[in-house]
Image (cartoon, rainbow, N blue to C red):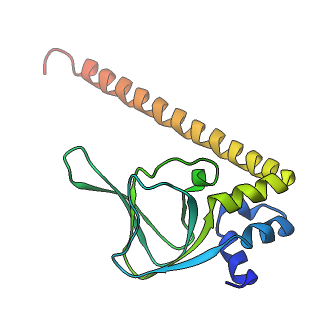
Amino acid sequence: MDLQHALECVNLVPLFRSLPQKQKEEVAKLIVQHKYTKGTIIYMAGDSVGHFLILEAGQIKISQVAANGKEQLLKVMQPGDFDGESALFNGNQRNVTATALVDSNICQIEQDAFQALLRSSSQLAVKLLAIMSKQISELQEEKNNCVNYRHYRQSCQVFIRNQRGPWR
C-alpha cells in the first residue's frame, strides 16, 4: 500500500487525525491492507486482539453470542469506522466477532509494530495519551448523563403515580 493511501486510512481515525503530519506518516507506514469477501469472519470472540483495524470500504457486522445462545448484533461498521484501539496497547482477547457483510477493505495496524513506534517516539506516545484521556473524560460524562437521565425518569414516574391519587 502506498503512503498516500495509507495516510487516507490514518486520517479516518480521530485518534490519529489530530497528529502532526510527520507522526501521521510514521503511523501510515505501519498500515497493511486486507481484503475480505462477503461472509468472511475477520475475527472471533476469544481470539487474541493483536491489531487495530480501520474499515476503508464495505460493511462489517460486530456481534456476540447472548446468554440464550443467539447472536446479538452490536453494530454494523461503515467506512471510516475502526475497531480495536485498545489492541494497540494491551494483549486482551476479543469479546465479539467481526464478519464482513459485503466485500470489505481494511487497513490494519499490528500491535507489536505500533508499540515499537511508541517506544521510539515519546512525542507520539504523549500526544496519543492526551487524545485518549480526552476520550475517556467524554465517555465518563456520557455515562453520568445516562445515569442522571435514568434517575430523572424514575422520579418522574413516581411523581406521575402520586399525582393520580387514590381515585384511580
Residue at 48% across, 30% down:
148
Q: Where is residue 9 shown, x and y percent of the image?
A: 65, 74
Q: Quadrant of the C terminus?
A: top left
Residue at 21% across, 54% down:
70
| In the displayed structure image, the side of residue 158 where residue 90 appears, left or right | right
Q: Quadrant of the N terminus?
A: bottom right
- Where residue 55 sits, quadrant-wise, is bottom right
Q: Where is residue 46 shown, x and y percent of the image?
A: 39, 52
Query: In the current view of this chain or complex, which residue is farthest to the bottom?
Result: 2
Q: Which residue occupies the foreground of this view, 158 or 39?
A: 39
Above or below for 120 versus 76: above
| In the displayed structure image, the side of residue 6 where residue 86 appears, left or right | left
- Where residue 74 sits, quadrant-wise, is bottom left
- Where residue 21 sits, quadrant-wise, is bottom right
| In the displayed structure image, the side of residue 49 where residue 32 appears, left or right | right
Can residue 11 be seen at all in this image of the molecule? Answer: no
Q: Where is residue 125 shown, x and y percent of the image?
A: 79, 51
Residue at 58% across, 61% down:
52
Can residue 102 be seen at all in this image of the molecule? Answer: yes
